[in-house]
Image (cartoon, grey):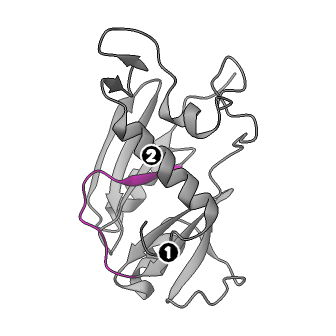
């Protein structure tokens, strides 16, 4: 068992993952063996067969309402905080506890971004999105500040654009179609 995984609940999860790996012929994507017979998914097995609570596949106890916050690593806390507040319109929260690493919590609409002073992972496509009312206006403001912006481009019924914060994290700006 990995260091830090000594709690009994973690042990059960790790044992459940080992069962998934040890089941020959199981294909997680389809839930079928190589011969085509239906199997119980590893997720269902770990939860004792009660993973799905209804036709949507949602779990019984987990009913997500929204993304509360995302946490990202930043190399320059001051300039990145400035970016999320002065450029993207967020507000620094005063209730961030001491978590042993420098950082800031910033309100962005109904969600938050938590900045943590640490090495930033290589950009491999990870990002988070901020909904905006006027994508063209937002992109224009960013470009007027000299920032490189990719887009806007259509995505489904909406549109999106991408910008990097001063630490190199990718931020998507998305405009959804108006709901009548």
From the top left corner, tell me how far across and down residue 180 is, in percent.
70, 21
The answer to which of 121 and 110 lies nearer the viewer is: 121
Q: Which residues are magenta?
A: 118-130
Q: Is residue 25 left or right of residue 177?
A: left
Q: Are marks 1 and 2 in contact (CB under 8 Å)?
A: no
Q: Quadrant of residue 10?
A: bottom right
In the depicted structure, whether residue 109 falls above or below residue 82: above
Q: Position of residue 82 (x, y in %)?
A: 47, 80
Q: Residue at x 64, y 29 (%)?
A: 49
Quickly name the residue at label 2.
Answer: 17
Decide whether residue 55 is among the magenta residues: no
Per the image, the residue denoted by label 1 is 4
Q: Position of residue 104 (x, y in %)?
A: 56, 81
Q: Is residue 3 above or below residue 162?
A: below
User: Considering depth in this image, is 180 or 44 the residue closer to the camera?
Assistant: 44
Residue 127 on the magenta span: yes
Q: Residue furthest top?
A: 36
């Amino acid at each position: 068992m990995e260091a830090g995984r000594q709690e009994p609940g973690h042990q059960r999860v790790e044992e459940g993952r080992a069962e998934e790996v040890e089941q020959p012929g199981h294909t997680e994507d389809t839930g079928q063996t190589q011969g085509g017979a239906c199997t119980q998914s590893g997720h269902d097995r770990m939860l004792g067969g009660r993973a799905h609570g209804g036709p949507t596949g949602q779990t019984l106890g987990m009913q997500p309402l929204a993304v509360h916050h995302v946490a990202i690593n930043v190399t320059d806390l001051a300039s990145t905080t400035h970016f999320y507040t002065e450029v993207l319109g967020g507000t620094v929260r005063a209730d961030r506890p001491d978590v042993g690493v420098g950082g800031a919590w910033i309100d962005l609409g109904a969600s938050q971004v938590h900045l943590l002073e640490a090495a930033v992972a290589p950009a491999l496509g990870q990002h988070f999105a901020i909904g905006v009312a006027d994508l063209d206006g937002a992109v224009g403001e960013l470009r007027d500040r000299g920032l490189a912006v990719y887009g806007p481009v259509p995505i489904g019924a909406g549109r999106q654009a991408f910008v990097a914060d001063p630490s190199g994290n990718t931020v998507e700006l998305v405009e959804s179609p108006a709901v009548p």
